[in-house]
Image (tube, grey):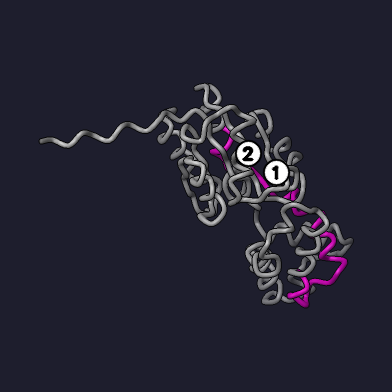
């Protein structure tokens, strides 16, 4: 007897997107260091003052700065409290002797200015919108990133923005995904979560949502066309 085929999965009616390293890239860390240098009122080039090798070490650190946050703040308190978010940043900066308090202040102040949308972010969101697919941003972040969404042109392409610092829940807690799905009116079994972290974004599977992981990439394109292929909106 031929076994009965598996039922086809339900059509995707809504897509949840992570923010950092999914819709936006944090930018070139060398550009960030230079911007912070200028914002701190310092003249010349960081490499000339710090030394080429030392400046390169600082740039490498800034490129991966938030990866160390899990060690300092394993409970992700930084993602629900702006004060803790800043405190964790300062604690990370303190591990690099070359970065003094004044420069650290300037780097934090210019951080969000460095973030830019991947070239395929807006076209992907627009295509989903044009095909009647609801979308929401679901981000673990302790600061308001709506200005970044406005600056990059993504704000008007999202149906909802759910930030951990607003709702008091942090991925992978199912509560933050449930909040986003409620806002866009989509059942979990008809949703797709797109992110870069199996640890955080994979939490959507606890509700029955499908999950697509796209690890952090370098360059202007992040491979978001995979989202359109999965939902049949290409």
Q: Position of residue 101 (x, y in %)?
A: 86, 69
Residue at the farthest front position: 1
Are discs 1 and 2 less than 8 Å apart at CB?
Answer: yes
Instruction: Please tell me which residue lies in front, 117 or 138.
Output: 138
Instruction: Please tell me which residue lies in front, 118 or 21.
Output: 21
Q: Is residue 165 left or right of residue 120?
A: right
In the rendered image, the quadrant that contains the C terminus is top left
| Residue pictured at 50% horizontal, 35% vertical | 191
- Alpha-carbon neighbours of circle 1 within 10 Å: few (<14), some, or many (≥20)? many
| Residue pictured at 54% horizontal, 49% vertical | 203
Q: Is residue 197 left or right of residue 52?
A: left
Q: Position of residue 135 (x, y in %)?
A: 58, 32
Where is 5 relative to 109, above or below?
A: above
| Residue pictured at 52% horizontal, 28% vertical | 128
Where is 32 relative to 211, above or below?
A: below
Instruction: Please tell me which residue lies in front, 109 or 73.
Output: 73
Instruction: Please tell me which residue lies in front, 28 or 215.
Output: 215
Q: Which residue is mark 2?
A: 137
- Alpha-carbon neighbours of circle 2 within 10 Å: few (<14), some, or many (≥20)? many
Tag count: 2
Which of the two labelled residues, at mark 1 and mark 2, occupies the earlier sequence position? 2
Inter-mark Cα distance, 1 to 2? 8 Å
Residue 108: in magenta span: yes
- Which segment is the magenta one? 93-122
Label 1 secondary element: strand
Q: Which residue is mark 1?
A: 163
């Amino acid at each position: 007897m031929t076994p009965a085929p598996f039922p086809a999965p339900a059509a995707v009616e809504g897509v949840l997107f992570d923010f950092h390293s999914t819709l936006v890239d944090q930018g070139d860390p060398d550009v960030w260091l230079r911007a912070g240098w200028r914002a701190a009122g310092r003249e010349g080039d960081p490499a000339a003052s710090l030394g080429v090798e030392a400046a390169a070490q600082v740039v490498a650190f800034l490129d991966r700065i938030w990866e160390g946050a899990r060690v300092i703040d394993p409970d992700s308190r930084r993602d629900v409290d702006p004060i803790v978010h800043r405190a964790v940043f300062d604690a990370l900066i303190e591990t690099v002797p070359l970065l003094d308090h004044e420069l650290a202040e300037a780097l934090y102040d210019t951080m969000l200015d460095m973030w830019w949308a991947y070239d395929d972010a807006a076209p992907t969101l627009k295509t989903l919108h044009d095909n009647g697919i609801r979308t929401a941003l679901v981000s673990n972040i302790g600061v308001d990133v709506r200005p970044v969404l406005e600056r990059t042109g993504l704000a008007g392409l999202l149906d909802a923005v759910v930030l951990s610092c607003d709702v008091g829940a942090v991925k992978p807690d199912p509560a933050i995904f449930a909040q986003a799905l409620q806002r866009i009116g989509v059942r979990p079994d008809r949703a797709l979560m797109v992110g870069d972290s199996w640890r955080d974004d994979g939490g959507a599977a606890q509700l029955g949502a499908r999950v697509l992981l796209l690890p952090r990439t370098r360059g202007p394109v992040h491979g978001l066309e995979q989202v359109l292929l999965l939902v049949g909106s290409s």
